[in-house]
Amino acid sequence: MCGLENTSAVGGLAFVLLCACLSAFAQSGAESAHGLVGLRPLPRTAALDHGHNHGGSWAGTPTYDEQKGNYPFVAEHLDVVKGWMDGDFKTRRLFFEFYWGLSEARDVLDPEKNLLIRTIREWEEKGGEIEHILICREYRLAIQRGHKEAQPGPFPEDTRILFPEDVDNIRKLFRDAHAKGLLRRDDYKLVQMVEHPSFFADDPRAHPIIAKMEGVAYECHQFNRHWPLETGWSKPEPVVRGARWTLDQGKEYIFYFGPILWKPSAQYYPFIERDWLQTFWKAGLPKHHPKMHYYLNLFPHDTGRGRPAGPETDPHSNLGFTKWLIEEIKFGGAR
């Protein structure tokens, strides 16, 4: 009798373990079928952001703080968030932008004084987990905004691309900071934020630098030289070429989309933001790939200042757009 009981117990245990393995395999397969969806929620609160002026004053613009409780689906399923851990978002995974080369003081190689190390440390102390650091030499805009010490990268075709030694210095900073107990880890994912949609892929001179990074991030706006989509800076063919080349190298690619139009722009029509994404997908931009990520850069630029932040049930709001994108990328379409 005892033997039969033991056999039954062993068999039951084996069944439980098999179910656990199959469940883990299924979850792994589901996770690997697509990349991440991220959001830059701006303005976060009136106190934090209404004093900003970028593409027009942000005073009085709709905030995400006002939408508390109004985005349960996005809160549950968003993968990565930028710059705000006080919202309803369940994720603790963060991304942020960082500009290298603005001044020697910012780029000092002492980990206890370096701004990048301090930025990571501050988010980790709040319980955040750094997923991606979108990094570049923001020379062109920095010079216009008064950063007189700013220096470009090695290529005039895309001055955002870092020097090889920049990457080496940053990696050493990570190791030194971790050894001193300043950071949780000794390395982080560096994603080269580029200005040109395909130079980094087309020109072999840039390849050794991209090889030092974990990936590439391309900003696609619905404003300025990016307009119109068919002939502007972000026309689909070079964007798709750059993305596919990046993925072929085994690197991660972030399509950093926004800011986006709103009324009273003469170019606006309902769901123009979705239309642009669908145009890119039809042109061959990978939609479901484990290293192809979609991050929304929805800050209130120009006419975009009037776009409502939420609720997610409003399909024309920023959170409604985010909900739609999550459904498209992670669930195969609207639920």
Image (cartoon, grey):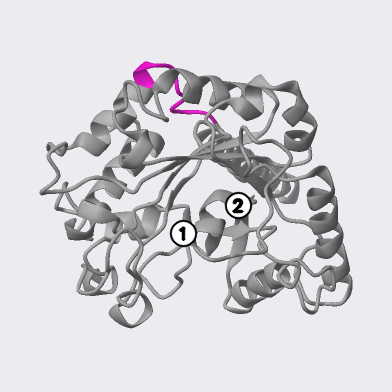
What whole-number distance in Å separates the C-alpha atoms at marks 1 and 2? 25 Å
Say which residue appears at 25% left-offset and 54% top-offset. Answer: 302
Give the crowd class for mark 1: few <14, some 14-19, many >=20 residues within 10 Å.
many
Marking on residue 260: none
Give the crowd class for mark 2: few <14, some 14-19, many >=20 residues within 10 Å.
many
Tag 2 or tag 1, which sits nearer the N-term? 1
Residue toward you, 99 or 176 = 99
Q: Position of residue 32 (x, y in %)?
A: 56, 34
Q: Secondary structure at mark 1?
A: strand
Q: Is residue 191 magenta?
A: no
Q: Overall secondary structure of the magenta stretch? A: loop
- Which residues make up the magenta segment? 281-289
Q: Position of residue 226 (x, y in %)?
A: 36, 35
Q: Position of residue 242 (x, y in %)?
A: 56, 25
Residue toward you, 147 or 39 = 147
User: Does any portion of residue 335 appear in the rendered image?
Assistant: no
Report the number of discs: 2
Q: Quadrant of residue 56?
A: bottom left
Q: Quadrant of residue 334?
A: top left
Say which residue appears at 28% left-offset and 61% top-offset. Answer: 72
Say which residue appears at 41% left-offset and 30% top-offset. Answer: 234
Q: Amino acid at mark 2?
A: Tyr
Q: Of circles 1 and 2, which is in front?
A: 2
Q: Amino acid at mark 1?
A: Val
Q: Secondary structure at mark 2?
A: helix
Say which residue appears at 58% left-offset and 34% top-offset. Answer: 291
In the picture of the structure, the residue carrying the numbered disc 1 is: 81
In the picture of the structure, the residue carrying the numbered disc 2 is: 139
Whether pointer 1 and pointer 2 mark residues with C-beta atoms closer than 8 Å, the reply is no
User: Does any portion of residue 114 appear in the rendered image?
Assistant: yes
